[in-house]
Amino acid sequence: MSWPRVAPEWQGLLRPSLDIQETDKQYRITLEVPGVEEKDIQLTLEDDVLYIRGEKRQEQEHKDAQYHRIERSYGSFQRALNVPADADQDTFKASFKNGVLTVTIDKRAQAGSPRGRSIPINS
């Protein structure tokens, strides 16, 4: 398993927190992206690499009798994760709730359980 690897040219961008969990049956990736909307996230799979890209666009306006202030926060992020060889690439599922992106990938079913056998020694 080889998770995660980030290309050097992406190091200056936003880096959302990433967790990867492995169970017997699947991989679960969670990415915290507060302030990012679902429509601003893109997932692609290219050559056994999962790319997670997105853009944060946040604007807050504060007014009172003394002053007027607008704060903006913009930035993009990209994460590239090598997909393990035992991941079933046809089972990728993604969900987004409360600023957390969750991607699940099932592991491929083993072709039968391993069976033992006697190996003759030839002289």
Image (cartoon, grey):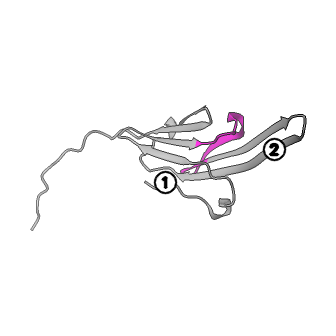
Q: Quadrant for residue 72, please give it.
A: top right
- Camera-side residue: 62 or 39? 62
Residue in view at x 67 percent, y 50 percent: 77
Q: x and y percent of residue 105 in the render?
A: 48, 39
Circle 2 residue: 71
Q: Secondary structure beneath disc 1?
A: loop
Q: x and y percent of residue 76 in the render?
A: 72, 49
The CA distance from mark 2 to mark 1 is: 35 Å
In the image, the segment drawn in magenta is 32-51
Q: Quadrant of the C terminus?
A: bottom left
Asked if disc 2 and disc 1 are in contact, CB closer than 8 Å, the reply is no
Q: Secondary structure beneath disc 2?
A: strand
Mark count? 2
Q: x and y percent of residue 100 in the render?
A: 59, 37
Identified by mark 2, the residue type is: Glu
Per the rendering, the mark at residue 3 is 1
| Other residues around mark 2 within 10 Å, as few (<14) / some (14–19) / many (≥20) | few
2 or 1: mark nearer the eye: 2
